[in-house]
Image: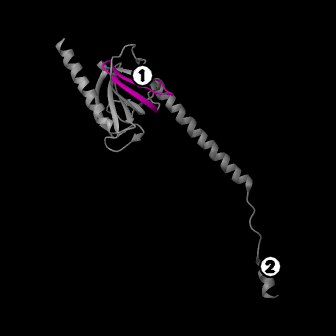
Amino acid sequence: MTPVLLLAAEKESAQVTDWAARIGWVVGLALFVALVYWLMREGWKWRGTLQGDLPELPVTPDETGPERLTMSGRYHGSTTAGQWLDRIVAHGLGTRSRAELTLTDAGLDVVRPGASDFFVPAAQLREARLDKGIAGKVLTEGGLLVVTWEHGDRLIDSGFRSDHAAEHNEWADTINSMIETNSREGAER
């Protein structure tokens, strides 16, 4: 046999793709992703059930007084105070969203398009500080305005990020001065 015929005899055709196995793997992977998503969703609902003792969120009163500060930005969630990974999901507090904040003498009004709005009365405000993270969101140092407030028998940290991060210092200072003024007035009574 000539060398050309030997080379031609040794060549084989390319393997045919096994479509049944490939489709089986894709379907299996899709089912696995769906199962993980369903388990995450059930975990979220279970956490809400465990936090069912949290009272309904206050609504904005009819008369709040003049605006001290306003801010637009993002609401990143609420956690148990001092435990930045213990997210609170009851009453929609776990839902991230855009937020419009208004600080008045009556308290802090949080308006969230697409999520439940809430109001923190001035008497319930405990502290405001700049921080770097809250459940599922970590930013640079001071990139997050965290407001600590009391609701029922719990202290809650709520995290906000302004569209203009330079506003955070003014917000923290103003809220803390309001808290000091309210505590002094309460002690004088």
- Label 2 CA crowd tier, 10 Å (few <14, some 14–19, many 20+): few
Helix, strand or loop at mark 2: helix
Q: Quick check: 76 above or below 182? A: below
Residue 143 screen position, x and y as percent: 34, 40
On residue 9, the disc is 2
Q: Is residue 136 above or below residue 183?
A: below
Amino acid carrying mark 2 in the image: Ala
Q: What is the secondary structure assignment of the residue under circle 1?
A: strand
Magenta-drawn segment: 96-117
Of pointers 2 and 1, the one earlier in the residue sequence: 2
Q: Count every numbered label the image shows and give the total.
A: 2
Q: Quadrant of residue 3?
A: bottom right
Residue at position x 31%, y 32% in the image: 82
* Residue 161, above or below 92: below
Can the viewer see residue 154 in this picture?
A: no
Q: Residue furthest left?
A: 188
